[in-house]
Amino acid sequence: MVKTSKDTEELILQFDMARMFLAEEEEEEARNVVLLQDITERKKTEEKIKDQLDELKRWQAVMLGREDRVQELKREVNDLCGRLGERVRYESQKKEERKNEN
């Protein structure tokens, strides 16, 4: 069967080579040992995991930014309640402010 360029697939190969010395009865003989391993699937999997991790980091940044904004809005509501003489609605924010003061 003849393969066209559409039929070809890119492979990622790992090439390892080592020199081994074998002791035969009277002589020491050197041999090269070569290992060629197809690591295409491993690299594809690593790339997929990296992409997923990058997406999770983006979501984490969005969620942390959102949480900061929610806390900022709660402080603003508490401040407005104080100006109007009403009770504070978000006690947790008062506790956070006290922690930050210390």
Image (cartoon, rainbow, N blue to C red):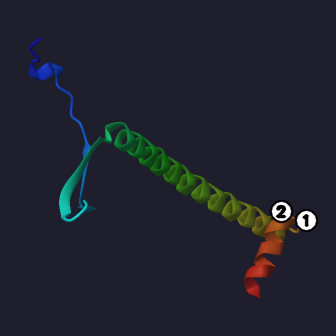
Q: Nearer the viewer, mark 1 or mark 2?
A: 2
Q: Residue furthest front?
A: 26
17 or 97: which is nearer to us? 17
Disc 1: CA contacts within 10 A as few (<14), some (14-19) or many (>=20) = few
Q: Position of residue 10 (x, y in %)?
A: 21, 34
101 or 86: which is nearer to us? 101
Q: Is 63 placed above or below 42 here? A: below
Q: Residue furthest right?
A: 87
Q: Position of residue 16 (x, y in %)?
A: 25, 54
- The amino acid marked with disc number 1 is Arg
21 or 2: which is nearer to us? 21
Q: Secondary structure at mark 1?
A: loop
Q: Which residue is mark 2?
A: 90
- 21 vs 84, left or right, is left
Q: Are marks 1 and 2 in contact (CB under 8 Å)?
A: no
Asked which quadrant contains residue 44, the reply is top left
Q: Which residue is mark 1?
A: 87
Real-space Cα separation, disc 1 to disc 2, in angstroms: 9 Å
- The amino acid marked with disc number 2 is Tyr
Q: Residue at x 73, y 81 (%)?
A: 100
- 40 vs 85, left or right, is left
Q: Position of residue 1 (x, y in %)?
A: 12, 11
Q: Residue at x 9, y 18 (%)?
A: 4
Quadrant in which the C terminus appears: bottom right
3 or 23: which is nearer to us? 23
As drawn, the label of residue 68 is none
Q: Residue at x 76, y 62 (%)?
A: 77
